[in-house]
Amino acid sequence: MSLISDRPGEPAYFANLNPPQRQAVETLEGPVLVLAGAGTGKTRVLTTRLGHILMTGRAYPSQVLAVTFTNKAAREMRERLERLIGADAEGMWLGTFHALAARILRRHAEAVGLKSNFTILDTDDQLRLVKQQLAAEGIDDKRSPARAVLAVIERWKDRGLTPDKVDGEDAGDLADGRLVKLYGQYQERLRALNATDFGDLLLHNLTIFLGQPAILADYQRKFRYILVDEYQDTNISQYLWLRLLAQSHKNICCVGDDDQSIYGWRGAEVGNILRFEQDFPGATVIRLEQNYRSTPEILNAAGHLIAHNAGRLGKTLWTAGTAGDKVRVRGMWDGEEEARWVADEIEADQRRGTPLSEVAVLVRASFQMREFEERFITTGIPYRVVGGPRFYERQEIRDALAYLRLIHQSDDDLAFERIVNTPRRGIGTATIQTLHMVGRGQGVSLMEAARRVVETDELKPAARKAVALLVRDFDRWRREAERLPHTELAQVVLDESGYTAMWQADKTPEAPGRLENLKELIVGMAEFETLAGFLEHVSLVMDNAIESGGDLVTLMTLHAAKGLEFAHVFLPGWEEGLFPHQRALDDNGQAGLEEERRLAYVGLTRAKRKADVSYAANRRMHGQWQSALPSRFVDELPHDQIEAETAQGMYGMRAPVGRGAFDDIETSSFGGYRRIVRPLPGGGPREGLQIRAVGGFAVGDRVFHQKFGTGTVREIEDAKLTINFDHAGEKRVMDSFVQKA
Ligand code: ATP
Ligand code: MG
């Protein structure tokens, strides 16, 4: 790229900026806060600013600190920067908070009693440590599960609190009131192991900076410029870290959007945005208002939605872009139909020449992915799952599959090894080694070796008992496999093995999602006649899953989609209870709801040209078919500017074109449904007709409908009722929205 622009003496990269963006790039001295909505070029400003600093020789790459939210975002920023400056950005400090803090900690590890080659533990290791501690302290780990203890410790770390700074009051009655002590011991154990966890990376940096002013002063001098993307999602300890590092030059530029703060559940504090101006007096605050990403229709829909949040700083967003398609909202019969429809639309995109890399499906909960993956595989749409493994590659799914494989085929040693001590049942490495030896020696599988070994005294009594129990369990399950439907068998096995309980006791934020995935696994199994058929399918799917790069549809959670953009975005599962997620509402009430709404805003604003929202009338959410109601977020879209459609043939394939279950939504307000969740008896939609029984209405019944008020049932057909409403006149409605008066 040429560095000469039309205006002599000016670098070409300025040509790609509007005036306030340019101001944000050129205001290099002093603190700058860019507070602006989605798609206004915050990330572009940050990248250009970085380039500008380097191009004008204000700093060497090693004197700039740039923070991104993900490693992927860091890679992208580096690539763009290198194109901009036409050179390698070597030696630059560009990465996530964790990566940057780890780099600093390696250099000064000894200041916190570590060696520079310290290990960074993963969650499993962390848990093992905590469990050992609980055992050593004689604390009942049923009442104080290790995961819960760890979660509290992690929140303390997010807030920059070392054990000596924690207020014991905070600890509640977990771990018999000994939580602070445990935290201290946990830190000691990590040190003894020459290890840290993720939270420690920042925390140790803070300790070093505060305890050794000379080291801090070095970094303060070194980093002449500090740049931070996605500032709204920093937690306290990250904030303190930035504040300390920026103290000398105060050349810190943070960009963010309070409406996109979606990590409160992980300790992020949107208040950091508000505090910026206090902590950096005289900060230049720049607002960007022109959106370059999305059509007016998409912006309008997103703006309407987010306006329902109370706690906002408030912003204007406009676009000079030309009109595009309306945002579409579509009601579906169930999740399977939703996935089929999305896949069909993606194929239509392909025919129109849209690259698949410009298409994304953004889900609220990872269990939703399964149905899409299955559909994509069936129709041959290449896809990738970002920000997490594919459904069948998830830890909990692999564990569950290992149980099932082992029932199906007891020689499956890999499966055996995977679950022999998951959940923990006291079968340690020594025992497993013994089994291996016996297996190899006698030329039999591990399961058979186990069976033989327990007849002997090879193992210590406790281990022997544990192995015998496991063998007995599998024998029983194998017998049950012959009489139980395979979905029920799976349920029985997961429950009796203690596997479900293991995740129920787990208090990390991921645990509920894992339980949902396990239930979704069983939903997936129901699509096959036999366990063998299902396992065969899974192995094919897994095999298929290795895509060779190229043009792929992106499937990811809304949380992972932050900062990204796609021509066409699908937003499925907009149903009460799923999105907003019931858990967010239960745990955090209004604040939880607002964070969910910001997540919806993030989802919509990822779209450049097309956004498709959908919801299903029936969803198998917690292992049960539930009739679901459209999300209140659907209500909150500007319905005169939305194209609402109902899938043809919903509710029994005979619905006339243009009429269906959600007729009332098409013709008037989206308005105010209440959440009525009624488990359907038996199988649900697959058994089709059963839905008729739901509600049990009879002609002549007096009923109440949320929108049309009271009336009398005149006619019943499938799940549809014709009702003579006292005020609204005759309407056809879905029985799920009707209650007996
Ligand atoms: P988000 O809040 O979603 O992270 P953002 O504010 O960081 O969004 P960017 O991703 O930087 O926005 O920019 C959105 C899109 O607009 C990008 O495709 C970017 O290249 C483009 N863009 C930004 N500024 C301009 C401009 N001045 N002229 C043309 N295109 C622009
Ligand atoms: Mg951005």
Image (cartoon, grey):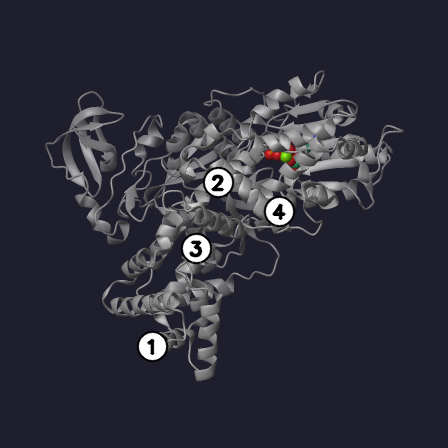
Would you call the spot at circle 1 few (<14 residues within 10 Å), some (14-19), or many (20 or more)?
Answer: few
Q: Is residue 82 above or below residue 531?
A: above
Would you call the spot at circle 2 few (<14 residues within 10 Å), some (14-19), or many (20 or more)?
Answer: some
Q: Residue 435: give its label.
A: none
Determine the CA span between mark 4 and mark 1.
43 Å
Amino acid tagged 4? Arg
Taking the image as shown, residue 542 lies to the left or right of residue 51, namely left
Amino acid tagged 2? Ala
Determine the CA span between mark 2 and mark 4.
19 Å
The C terminus - image quarter: top left
Camera-nearest label, 4 or 3:
4
Q: Which residue is mark 4?
A: 191
Residue 39: percent from left, percent from top: 61, 32
Furthest-bottom residue in view? 442
Q: Residue at x 45, y 67 (%)?
A: 417
Q: Which residue is mark 3?
A: 396
